[in-house]
Amino acid sequence: MLRLYFMLLFTSLVFNATADNFYSVKGQIYSDQGEPLTGVTILIKENLRGAQTDSLGRFVIDKLKPGDYTLIVSAIGYNQQFLVVTIAYSSVSHLVIHLKANVKGLNEVNILGRQENHDNLIDLTRTPMPSTVITRKQIEMMGSRRLDEVLKEQTGLAVVNDIGAGPRAVGLQLQGFDSGYTMIMIDGQPMTGRNSGNFDLSRISVANIERIEIIKGASSCLFGSEALAGVVNIVTRQNISQSQGLANIRYGSFNTLDATLEGETPFAKGKGSGYLSGNYYRTDGFNSNPYLSEGKTAPPYNSYTIQGRARYTLSNINALNLTGRFAVRNSDNQISYNTTPTKDVLGETDLNGAAILNSNFSSGLRLKTQYYLTRYSTDQNINSLSGQVLIPENNFVQYLHRVEVQAAQTYWGGMAFTAGLGGQLETMNNNLYNGSQSQSTVFIYAQGDCTLSDKLNLTGGLRGERQNRYGSSLTPSFGIKYQPVQALMLKAAIATGFKTPDFRQLYLNFTNLAGGGYTVLGTDIFTSELKKLQDAGQIASVFANASKVSTLQPERSVSYSGGFTWVITPSLKADVNAFYNDVRNFINTDQVASKTIGAQVFSYFNIAKAYLTGADIGLSWNPAAGWNISAGYQLLYAKDRSVIDSIKNGTGLYAKVYDAKTGKIRRSKVSDYFGLDNRCRHMANIKITYANDPSGITAMFRVNYRDKYGFQESNIPNNFLDPYDVYVSPFFLLNASVQKTLMNKHFSVQLAADNIMNYRDQLMPAQSGRTIMLGLNYRFFKNK
Amino acid sequence: MKINANNHFSIKRLLIAFTTMAALSSCTKDQLRPQLADGSSIVVTDLPGDTGRTVATGFRTFYFSLTTNAKVDSTQKQTADWDICFAREYNSYLGVNSGTDNASYGIGGPGHGAMVQVNQAYDQVTTAPSDDVFKNNGVSSAGWDPGNGTGWYFYDLNTHIAVPIKNRTFVIRTATGKYAKLELVSMYKGAPAVVTNLYWPAPYFTFRYYVQQDGTRNLATKN
C-alpha cells in the first residue's frame, strides 16, 4: 500500500499534474526597504500548510481549495504579519508583502531559522545521518576564536595531536575516526591542506562564520570521497538585508589578540548585496612540556583572514554570487630542551573562491551552477640553529578545481528533491612526492526527502563517482523518521562511505632522518624507491608483504545509526542515537622491509577492518526563563578487527602482554585490547547558559570531560594498546563566559575564560592552559 | 514548566557537583619517572651522544668506562680503558670491549668484554651468568629490537618514538674481566617518562649500572 502511494506520488511529481479544482497563492515578500527577503516562512493558519521564500523573496502554496485563508508571514528580524486571502475559483498571484524590520532582532547578526543557502542546495539537516548545527550566536556566547576551540567542545568530537606526524599535526576526531576521514567544507565545497591527513582547524577563524553544520556518519552519498566519517561545513554569511557593520577586539592570556572588522550592505535597491570581513589573530602559544626551556607545544602564530561575498540579482530568475576567502598564517617556534635550539617555521596560505549562478524558476525549480577553486600552500621546516642539519621539510601546493550543477525542487505534497553533477581536478606539488601529481573525479548524486504522512518521513540518496584511477563507486544512503506521537521521533539510517587513497598514500617518499631514520613509501613509487634503497645497500631484508604493496583499494564504510528524539516535557528534550561504523579496507602503514641501520621501511596496505561503534546522548532542559542546561555524552568502542584476530591467533608480537601487576609477560587476551589509540571511551559535556534580555546579560558555563585515551605503547612491543600502555589521563576542562550589551545593543563587553582551572598535560601538547580574554564589540546599525 | 523550589534545589546541587569537579580539574598531570638510584648503582643522566646529527650524516661511536664513569676518547679504542660503546644510529647500539669478537669495536685490542641480555628487572638480576652463558648466549650489541627479542628499545608504530623495553638488563663483563649489570633508560634529553615530540633531542643517554669490584659474580644491588 505504502509502495503504491509512493509510486503514485512519484508519478504525480514527474508529470507535475495539478488537479483542476485546486488553486494556488503566489507572491513575493520584501523588506520595508524594498529588498526581496529570503527564507521567510508563510503559514496558512487554517490548514497549517506553508512555504518559504526563495532568494528573490518568492513563494507559492498550491493545491488550495476555494475559501478564506489567513497567511502568517514571519521571519527572524521582522515583525510577524497576518494577511487574509480569499480564493474564489481563481489562483491568487502577485501578492506583494512588505515586512517591517524588528529592531530587536536586527542587532543579532545570527539567524536561527532556516535560511536559504545560495552556495549549497542540499540541506544538511535533512540528510539521513544525524546532524548538528552550531549557530553564530552560540559561537559568540562561547567567546571562541578559532574553529578547533568550538568543535572540540561538541559531543563526539575531539581535537588530538598526531605525534608521529610531527609537532604541528593536530586534527579533528569524529566518532572515533581520524581527521583524514572527515571532510571539512566551506559553503558546501571541500577545503584542502592536510598534514598527514590531519586538518588543523586552528587555521580557521570563526569570526566570519554564520554557522557550522556537522554530520556524523558516512556522508559520501552526497559529498563523495573523504566524507567517510562525516562532514563539517562552515557556512559563511549568506543573506544581507540591511547595512550594518561590526568591530570586535579581544585580548587576553598569552598575548592573544583577535580583531575583526566587518561590514555588509545591500545596494542597487536591493538587487545587490555584499559583505567584507577581515580578521587578525595572534597568539604567543602555550607550552605544556616541562622539559622545554624555550618554545611552545601549541605553537605561536599570527594569521590574517579576508572574506567576502557579493551577490547581484541579474533577472527575475538569475542571481550571481561571488565568494572568496583568503587566509595567511605564519608561525615561528624556537624550541630548546636546554640544548641548541631548533627553529620550527610554518607559513601557509589558503584561498577559497567560488562563482555561483543561482536560478530560481517560477516552477519552483532551483538551480545552482558553480565553479569552485581552492588553493592551499604550506612551507614547514625545522632547522637546527647550530646550522648543521635541516630536519624535515614539508612543502606543498595543492589545488582543487570543481564545477558543479545542483538542482532542487520542492513539491508541497511533501517531497524535496536535490540532485547534482560535476567534476573536479585536484593537483598536488609536494617536495616529498617526486613532483606534481593529479587526480580527477566526475560525480552525480541525488537525494530525495519524502514526507509520506504526518508521521512518516523517508530520505534516500545515491551518489555515483568515477575517479580517474580507482574507477566507479556507488554510495547509497537511506533514512527513515517516524513520529508515532507528537513528543517522540524515531530515527534510523544507513549510509555508505568511501575514501580513495590520498596523494600521500600513493606518492610519499619520506625518510625521517631526525626521527629514527624510518622511511615511508607511497604505493605508487614503492617498487622503484625500494630498488633505489636496495641498490644503495641500505636494505637488510624485505618482508613477504612487499609483494602485495601495489594493490591499494579505496577504503569503504557502512554507517548504521538509530535513535530517537523525545520531548519529555516542553522544557526537557532528549536525543539518543546509537551508531555503528563498519570499515573495510582501512588503510594503515605496515612494515615492508628493514634497513641495515635497523630502521623500518613502511608502505600502505588495506590491512585493517575496523569498527567504531557507540552511542551519543543529548539532553536539553530549560529549568526557568532565560536558563538552559544541556548535556552531551558519547560512548565509543573503536577497534581494529585484524588486531583482535591476531590476539586470538597469537600471531607474532600480538601474542604477548607485559602485565604490570605481576611484572611478567603473559599470553594476551582479546580483553586486553583497549582499541585504537587517541580514542576515549567516554566523553561528556555540560553547558549552562543564562540570558537575561532586559539587562542584556548572557552567561555560559561549560564543563568538558574526556576519559583516558591511549597515547602509545609501553613495556614491550605488541602492536596494540593494552591496559599497561601509556594513556592520557581523564580530565575535565571548565570554561565560562559572560557578556553584557550596552548602548541600545550597539556595544557589548565579554569576558571569556577557557580552561579556568589551568589543566595541563604534557601528553596533550596542543591543549592550552587557562586563557582569559576580554572582548569589546561594537555593532553599527541604524536605530529605528 | 513552572519554576519551583525543587528546581532551585537541583540547581544548587548541580553547583555543588561542579565545585567538586573544579577541584578535580585543577591539578596538572605529571608523568612519573621511575626511581633509578638504589644506593649502590651509578646513575648516568643525559650523557650526550653524537648530537646534532641525523641518520643521513651518521653518528660517531663513543666509548665509556664503567670504572671512571666517563667517556673515553676514541683514540683509546685499542686499550682496555673503555668498557662499553654506543654506536650506529643515534648511538643507540650498546657494545662491549672484546678483543676477540669480530663485531666488537675493541677487536684486536686487549679487552675481555662480553655481554648477555637477561630478561629480568634490573634489581632482580643478582648474579652474573656463567662463562658458558656468556659464550653461547652472548650478544655483540643491543639496540633496536626488531621483534626477535634482542635489544633495549622498540619504535611505537604510531608515534615513531623509541620506547625502552621492560625487563631488559644487560650483564656485562668489563674490559678487565669484572662483572657488571646495566639498564638503559632513555636516549632522549631529560629521560622523560613519555616522549611527546617526534623531534625530541636525541641521543642523550640515561642509564644505570653496577660494577662488582671484588671480581665475583654477585650483582645484588637492592639495599
Image (cartoon, coloured by chain):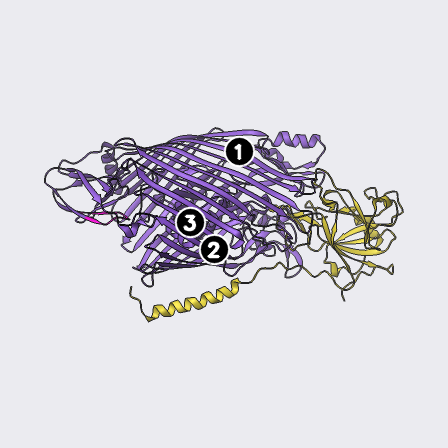
Chain colours: A purple, B yellow
Res A248 label: 3
- What chain does mark 3 sit on? A
Q: Which secondary structure, mark 1?
A: strand
Residue type at mark 1? Val
Distance CA(mark 1)–CA(mark 2): 35 Å
Residue type at mark 2? Met
Res A355 label: none
Q: What is the magenta range?
A: A71-81
Mark toward the start of the polypeptide (1 vs 2): 1
Q: Position of residue A523 (x, y in %)?
A: 58, 33
Marks 1/3 same chain: yes
Q: With A281 as the anchor, is B209 left or right in this view?
A: right
Q: Are marks 3 and 2 in contact (CB under 8 Å)?
A: no
Distance CA(mark 3)–CA(mark 2): 12 Å
Residue type at mark 3? Asn
Q: Position of residue B46 (x, y in %)?
A: 73, 53
Q: Position of residue A569 (x, y in %)?
A: 30, 61
